[in-house]
Amino acid sequence: MSNNDTIPDLAPHELALLRQTIALSEESKARGRHPFAALVADEHGHIVSQAGNNSMPPEGDPTQHAELVAAALAARKLSPEQLARCTLYTSAEPCCMCSGAVYWTGIGRVVYALSEHTLLGLTGDHPENPTFSLPCREVFARGQRKVQVVGPLIEAEAAEPHRGFWQR
Ligand SMILES: [Zn+2]
């Protein structure tokens, strides 16, 4: 897919932000972490927070998924009204824990690259990442507040950092 491709529901600068999370996921892998990353940007595309995966002890812990960390950092900086206008961009679809973090921080929208279903195909039953088979839309559908979701997008690009990573 070229940079000139248009995607419904996504402004061109948003595709750039999504690609940035994929680049950050490579950096996360280079640091010895799992290849996941996320960022939160406001309605103008200004980055509020970003994070790579930090789920491996002793530096991190299993709750330190990139999306949860990025959402929590954004919630410390912005008001609820501002958060409602923000989007969380992530290299892979948020798991139910991270979808919960998006919901509870009040972030209004999620844009993801790899679907959880595709990710499950890549990670299999790897003990470090026993991926749920639970789309984030199903989690958000049970909430009282609406969260918009766009994805999956550019999955082949987003899968690249995972190639060979989860083989045992
Ligand atoms: Zn997660």
Image (tube, helix red, strand yellow):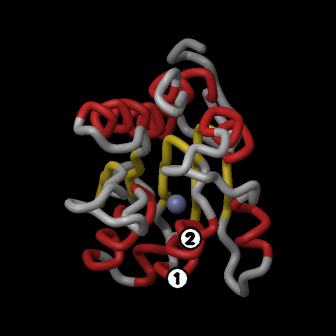
**Label 1: element kind:** helix
Name which residue type carries label 1: Trp
**Label 2: element kind:** helix
Q: Is mark 2 within 8 Å of ligand 1?
A: yes
Q: Nearer the viewer, residue 55 or 40?
A: 55
Name which residue type carries label 2: Met
x%, y% of residue 97? 56, 70
Name the residue beneath numbered marker 1: 104
| Quadrant of the rendering where the N terminus is positioned | top right
Locate residue 17: give its quadrant.
Answer: top left
Residue extending furthest toward the bottom? 144
CA–CA distance between discs 1 and 2?
11 Å
x%, y% of residue 164? 50, 22
Name the residue beneath numbered marker 2: 97
Left or right: where 131 falls relative to 166: right
Circle 1 Cα neighbour tier, 10 Å, few/some/many (<14 / 14–19 / ≥20): some
